[in-house]
Amino acid sequence: MTGTEHGPEVRRTSGTRRAGGAAVGGERVDAPGAGRGPQGGAAGAHVTRGAAGADDDRRGRPAPGSDDARPAHRTSGEGGGPGSGFAARLAEFAAQCRERIPRAVAEDTTDRISDALGNCLAALGPYVGDETAGGPHEAALTAARRAGGTPESTAIGSGVRLPADRAALVNGTLAHALDFDDTHLPSVLHPTAAVLPAALAAAEASGADGALTVAALAAGGEVCVRLGMASYDPRLRNSVFFEKGLHATSICGTVGAAVAAGLAQGLTAAQLADAIGIACSMGAGVIEANRTGGTVKRIHCGWAAHCGISAAQLAAGGVTGPPTVLEGRFGFLTAFLGDRWDAGPLLAGLDVMDDAARWEYPRTVYKPYPSNHFTHPGIDCALALRAAGLDPADVVTAELGVAAAPRRTIGEPREQKVRPASPYHAKFSGPYTVASALLADWDRGPGVQLRDFTPEAFTDPRRLALAARVEVVSDKRCDAEFPHAFGAVLRVRTRGGARLEHRVASSRGGPGNPLTAAELAEKFQAGAEPLLGAERTRRLAAATAALPGSGPGCVTDLLGLTTI
């Protein structure tokens, strides 16, 4: 879906991932779209233990998560068969993933590992913009090292060996540190940053091979986003988690991380159900930091990964969870969401997951800009107007229209959004990110980049003066699209009296407007190469791509390549 212009004419094109057929064992398969918009997949094409392959052409199809595909009314427990609790059904699905997952899903999941590793390394680079020395990652690493314990898993960047749960805490904090991690729609949560650190740490501790590691992330990511989808209320056009100020990523991510860790550790289906039951008592997180600042949100994914491993370890030791922990009267869904939850998206199609098209995790979209995803369509609009000739110095007023839910995150309180409290807080500001896009240094590449969130950038008087001219308002068309796509409209009045407008229905990288394979490779390289150098960055990319076919101990080798 390209942008709709009501002023300067600017065309946007969306990219496809890779072209051509992927041959695995002589078989040609069609892969789904790796989360770059609504995706399709080929039934019957699978990855079994040790198999690997490349992507084929991406083809679009209506997303099962859309309103048209949802039940006409909300349910509170519909879909569970007699004696079959929701946790047991999710655990059975996950256990089957240990033996095989659709090949297209494995390929997509491997790409997500690459993106997350690049984000982790970028978070150790020169453009982190922390307002405190070292930031949350250093605090997590220091606490983990001080606690001691059996060295089981590798901390990215430092190479320090830690107990698996603490390595997951450190790496999960890194994965979410820049707010550059992928986002699932309509759940609006970040599955990979919460689930992958648990999968890697548990796989390394247990000596799992690459195929099991990939399957663990795929299964855990799927459970995570399905829990998030159960919270979407079409009447609110938003997640009930977010309406209540809860961080769905850390809450649902804890359960997904428990599934991933349990798979990697070799838990049975019954033990996986117990791990889910235990994890449901561990997930937490509030999102006030999105509005008014604070660094705690960067710990959320690390804490989810840490708790997920702990839940799996406790299940392995014999601790049990309630069989109705999800759907029960005092279960996870009712406790967090009241009566506003829907079992349909959580349970639909779990018995036919051999078909890649049934999976939700691969619909997760990648971020082109290192900021809160709600800011992205506004950035796109600003870049389009700038490319069409708008001089930032000519801007008298600018009105950024977004959906009502994003407006509360990126537009309120206004006095803090036009003058962010920290570089990280600036990532959640519509006015600041629009101003940054309009003032982008095009000689160094257009777009909002990591250098736009340094202490120097967020205190730049010119940038702050422009941000103060930007008003964030609700827009009905954006409301109609949200949260299946993030749209925005930017209206600008210039000193010469001109009125310019640009609208996008789906932000760059979002549904219908995917990033290309080249853009994703460039993002990974930009994050890794400043720290690792060109040769080791190439080796890390190759090792990640080869992960589905790699043997036991491969995770240690992979993470060893990230040591600075």
Image: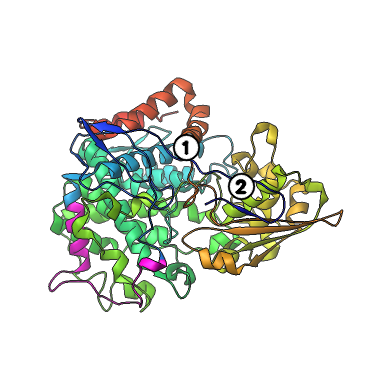
Q: Position of residue 458 (x, y in %)?
A: 68, 47
Q: Is residue 6 left or right of residue 227?
A: right
Quadrant of residue 342 within the rendered picture? bottom left
Looking at the rendered structure, which numbered label has been put on residue 363? none
Q: Is residue 45 visible?
A: yes
| Circle 1 residue | 520
Labels 2, 1: front one: 1
Q: Is residue 436 left or right of residue 530?
A: right
Q: Position of residue 420 (x, y in %)?
A: 66, 55
Q: Is residue 131 left or right of residue 540?
A: right
Outermost right residue: 496
| Circle 2 residue | 131
The residue drawn where x is 30% and y is 54% is 222
Residue 88 on the magenta segment: yes
The residue drawn where x is 48% and y is 33% is 518
> Which residues lie in the magenta part?
67-95
Give the residue type at disc 1: Leu
Say few, some or many: other residues with alpha carbon within 10 Å of mark 2 (under 14 / 14 to 19 / 20 or more): some
